[in-house]
Image (tube, helix red, strand yellow):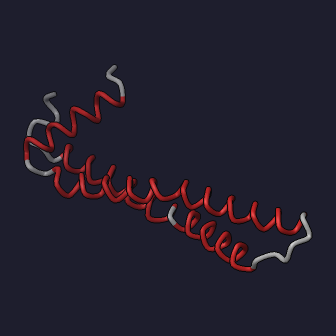
Amino acid sequence: MASAVGLYRKAKAKLQHEGKWTKIGGLLLLSQLCRSLIWPCFLIAAALFAAAVHEWFTGQSVESSNLLGGTLCLLLGLFLFIPYINTRVEHMIEMYDGVSNLPDARTS
């Protein structure tokens, strides 16, 4: 049995050969863009919350901008999961449909 990576590459090559990869590749690019923004949002939120906690422990006045910024970054990171998962699933569905509709899909 072929590996999943091998099957994906074979399907991608067939779709590129048929000229159907442009739309499917665009969905993959959007998915990767959303994924690349998730972790930085969480790291920035953690840093801002750590700064607020440090201010609180040292007796300084806690900057509300640290708390607000941390909360917004955390929410943005969480909300980025929605388009990431949506575009990832749509990419896989489009890829499956594209490959299954090829004339030689059953012969290889």
Most distant residue in the top direction = 1
Q: Nearer the viewer, residue 107 or 23?
A: 23
Image side of residue 87 versus residue 103, left or right: right
**Where 4 sits versus 81, above or below?**
above
Picture coordinates of residue 86, whole percent (x, y): 42, 61
Residue in the image at 16% along x and 54% along y: 22
**Where 104 sits versus 39, above or below?**
above
**Where 2 sits versus 90, above or below?**
above
Quadrant of residue 16 in the image?
top left
Image side of residue 72 versus residue 96, left or right: right
Residue in the image at 63% along x and 66% along y: 74
Report how many numbered discs are placed on residues in the image.
0
**Image quarter hosting the N terminus:** top left
Picture coordinates of residue 88, whole percent (x, y): 39, 54
**Image quarter hosting the C terminus:** top left
Picture coordinates of residue 33, whole percent (x, y): 38, 57
Image side of residue 54 versus residue 93, left or right: right
Q: Nearer the viewer, residue 88 or 65?
A: 65
Q: Nearer the viewer, residue 44 or 102?
A: 44
Picture coordinates of residue 72, whole percent (x, y): 62, 74
Quadrant of residue 59 in the image?
bottom right
Image side of residue 67 versus residue 1, left or right: right
Residue in the image at 8% along x and 49% along y: 19
